[in-house]
Image (cartoon, helix red, strand yellow):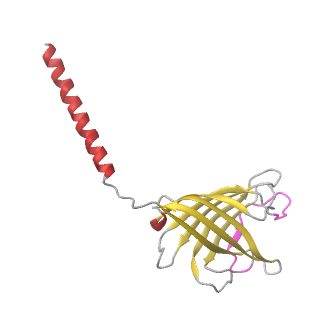
Amino acid sequence: MASSILVPSTKLLMMLALLLGILICSESTIDHGFLQETNMTLYIHDYFSGPNATTIAISSPSDDSWIADNFGIMYYTDNPVTEGREPDSDRIGRAQGTFVSSAMDGSNSQVVMSVVFDTEQYQGSTLEIQGAGNPVQRVKEVSVVSGTGQFRYARGFATFETVYYDRAANYSVAEWNITMEHY
């Protein structure tokens, strides 16, 4: 009787060991390439009004005043991304996401942004950016939390600041400096 109890246990252990070996071998054959660091500067062009507005408010404050630091104000954005700060600079993609005034006193805005590249070099690659920043700070810092394509498994940080603002035209340009590691 004792031997019949040991035989299934031994078989079960051998099957588990074999399965574990297969899983370990299959994971070790996945090649992510080499971890590399990339630094890039992008320019985000923001048009707040007009027929080609790239940023729109999607929530209405109770007093109808659209001030960016009012708690609960949310904006959707789909802005052109270029290599230089001029509007006619070479386009490299779109910055798509949301900005939310997330602090009751207006001291922080939450940023969730996807930079979607459409150049030949980075076609279809994305960077996912997220974080909170004080809207009155000149330079804000957020996290690079992920990426796809050329920036798979990206992690790092991005700083951004407004480098040009035309109040009459409701147009601004933000410079984003991104430092990240990726495969």
Q: Quadrant of residue 127?
A: bottom right
The span shown in magenta is 50-67
For residue 168, above or below residue 61 = below
Residue at (67%, 64%) from the top-left corner? 159
Q: Is residue 138 magenta?
A: no
For the residue pair 3 and 158, the one nearer the viewer reads as 158
For residue 103, above or below residue 177 = above
- Residue lying at the far bottom in this picture: please name it: 88
Q: Quadrant of residue 100?
A: bottom right
- Residue lying at the far top in this picture: please name it: 1
Residue at (32%, 50%) from the top-left corner? 28
Residue 22 x %, y % = 26, 44
Q: Is residue 61 magenta?
A: yes
Which quarter of the figure is the C terminus placed in? bottom left
For residue 63, above or below residue 167 = above
Residue 147 x %, y % = 51, 61
Residue 49 x %, y % = 75, 76
Residue at (64%, 80%) from the top-left corner? 84
Q: Is residue 126 left or right of residue 136?
A: left
Which quarter of the figure is the N terminus placed in? top left
For residue 20, above or below residue 165 = above
Overall secondary structure of the magenta section: loop
Q: Is residue 97 left or right of residue 119?
A: right
Q: Quadrant of residue 139?
A: bottom right
Residue 124 x %, y % = 47, 71
